[in-house]
Image (cartoon, helix red, strand yellow):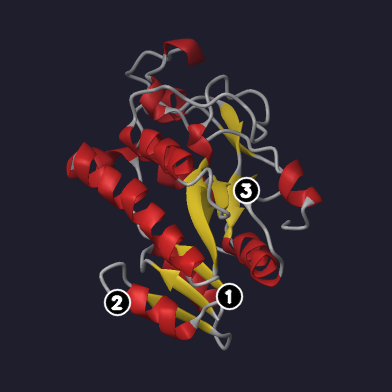
Amino acid sequence: MILIIGQGFIGSSIAAFMTGKARKLVSHTDDWRTLIATLSPSLVVNAAGIVGQKKCNAAGWDATLAANVDFAREVAETALNYKSQCLLFSTGAVYAKPNSTPKPEHAELSKIDNPYVQSKIQMEVAVKDMDVIVFRIPSVVGAGYHKWDYLNRIRECMWVEDCYTSLLGMSTLYQAIGHVNQHKVSGIFNIADPGFVHIPSYVKQHYKELPVRQDDQMPENYALAHILDTTKAQLAGIL
């Protein structure tokens, strides 16, 4: 039994991929504590939280900490108390610039003033002494995505640098979750699809009235997720 907490895009998509499997999808407002105690799930997946800088700014810092740090720690503590594995989601955006090289898990973390990024870093710190699994993931897309689907989504960004970035399809994420459900795993892992997607400069192509800035002149809070080095996850058999 896999218990998924959070009915947003990731939680709902995981549950959809597990149709016919032993899984249960609940909201963070449901009585998930009682469900963990009574169902004894092999894995508890916390997909609840406030995602993205825009939503975190709107919610405020206290609410962001409560959703992304305090709630995640509570889920982890409850799951471990009932001998369930626990999977938490972080983001590939936790890594510091430059974006030009793949980032392994031990790479330097970001210090930018982005509430979403900083809340995920604090979440990782809050559970670092617990026997839990943390997936650092890039943008998550559907199983049969085409790179142009993703490119169309980022046109709303004011500044988009000409770079490469990692993406994560649901089929890859489902595979990784299936592995940790079957094997005892703990630690932080980068999870992404193999290969990278090229992101052209939409400032140059679609916002010609704006000056094109070099990477080191661009507002850091608009930086895309980095290229993720998934060697650790591959060696662990997760990918």
Say which quarter of the image contains residue 219: top left
Secondary structure beneath dot 1 equals loop
Vertical position of residue 184 compared to residue 22: above or below: above
The numbered mark at residue 187 is 3
Q: Amino acid at mark 1?
A: Ser
* Residue 65, horizontal then vertical, whole percent: 29, 43
**What's the distance in space between the residues labelled 3 and 1, CA to CA?**
17 Å
Q: Is residue 179 positioned above or below 128 on the image?
A: below
Tell me where residue 205 appears, x and y as whole percent. 45, 28
Q: Nearer the viewer, residue 71 or 5?
A: 71
Q: Residue furthest front?
A: 81
97 relative position to 113: left or right:
right
State left or right for residue 136 relative to residue 159. Answer: right
Residue beneath disc 1: 42
| Left or right placement of residue 184 versus residue 115 in this view | right
The residue labelled by disc 2 is 31
Residue 50 in sight in this render: no
Q: Which residue is more in the foreground, 217 or 28?
A: 28
Q: Is residue 137 visible?
A: yes
Graded by Cα atoms within 10 Å as few (under 14), some (14 to 19) or many (20 or more), the crowding at tag 3 reads some
Report the amino acid beneath label 3.
Answer: Gly
Observer-nearest residue: 217 or 107? Answer: 107
Q: Residue at x 43, y 76 (%)?
A: 36
Q: Residue 85 got which mark? A: none
User: Is the Cβ of the residue at disc 3 closer than 8 Å to that at disc 1?
Assistant: no
Secondary structure of the residue carrying tag 3 is strand
